[in-house]
Image (cartoon, grey):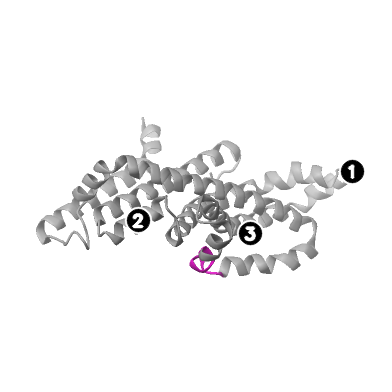
Amino acid sequence: MLAGRAGLRPILAPAITLVALLLLWEAADRVFHFNVILLPSPSEIAVAAYENFGRLLKETGITMFESVMGFLLGSGAAFLLAIVFVHSRLTQEAVYPYAVALKSTPLIAIAPLLVLWFGNGVLSKIVMSALVAFFPVLVNAVNGLTAVDPEALDLMKSLSASRFQVLLKIRIPNAAGYIFAALKIASSLAVVGAVIGEFTGASVGVGHLINTSSYYLDIPLMFAAIGMISLGGILFFATTALVERRVVFWSATV
């Protein structure tokens, strides 16, 4: 019984906190009568979400598709490049500074270029999402692949193991915890990247819906769109964490 309660605590605690904040927000709106253009009440946001639920679901689905595809593309490219870095110090020294420079560049400055190069459709948003997800996975993958016990490497060398065998049996299992920690960060950043790409230029997606709602001063719908994409990002993060628990089952920190 106690174990069941402990298992539900990570879900119940934030849910109760959210309900309490919404009730407090609603009560404050009833007392102070906030201007709906500045801060709509939770009930007004709920009405807007109900009346536009189909549209919200469609636009959120498009943004989440861009986020997932960008996440897979960016994370996969980062992992492959990390393997190259581990086996070629020269390549790491030559390329790594440019990865840092790319990470340091503001996203809003890159977005117009991506729209120009890849068009106003979904592809440019996927590329933006991939760029955002790329760096944390690269850094953690390199750290995990290199933080190997020297005695384990010596043992594999004494057994005449190839580089591929060392990578498969020693380096990747050792790096799994590092990589999944980065993947959880990248899953959230991928959603941010997709939305920023939609802000710059798009005809669909949550970013486009937020821009349109803001232009027409439909603030309750704008808040509803923000809530939907936030929920999508939480589910994406939770899915990544669930996969981590299944894959890195030996880690005490999972």
Judged from the image, the secondary structure of the residue bearing numbered disc 1 is: loop
Instruction: Please state if 20 lies on the left or on the right of 27 as rendered.
Output: right
Specify the quadrant of the image occupied by residue 118: bottom right
Q: Earlier in the sequence, mark 3 or mark 1?
A: 3
> Could you tell me which secondary element the residue under label 3 belongs to?
helix
Q: CA distance from mark 3 to mark 2?
A: 33 Å
Give the residues drawn in magenta, as a range.
105-111
Q: Element under label 2?
A: helix
- Whichever of labels 3 and 2 marks the residue nearer the N terminus, that label is 3
Amino acid at circle 3: Val
User: Does any portion of residue 147 appear in the rendered image?
Assistant: no
Q: Residue at x 80, y 44 (%)?
A: 164
Q: Nearer the viewer, mark 3 or mark 2?
A: 2
Q: Which residue is mark 2?
A: 210
Q: Say above or below: 31 vs 253.
A: below
Name the residue carrying label 3: 139
Q: CA distance from mark 2 to mark 1?
A: 58 Å
Q: Name the residue type under label 2.
A: Ile
Return the x and y of residue 122 as percentages of the image width and height.
51, 50
In magenta segment, residue 204: no
Give me the residue at 70% from left, 46% from top. 172
**Other residues around mark 2 within 10 Å, as few (<14) / some (14–19) / many (≥20):** many
Q: Amino acid at mark 1?
A: Ser
| Neighbour tally class for label 1: few under 14, some 14-19, many 20 plus, Cα within 10 Å | few
Name the N-terminal-most of marks 2 and 1.
1
In this view, the mark in front (2 or 1): 2
Residue plotted at (62% across, 70% down): 101
Residues tagged 3 and 1 counted as in contact (Cβ below 8 A): no
Does the residue at mark 2 contact the one at mark 1 (Cβ under 8 Å)? no
Q: Quickly name the residue at label 1.
A: 160
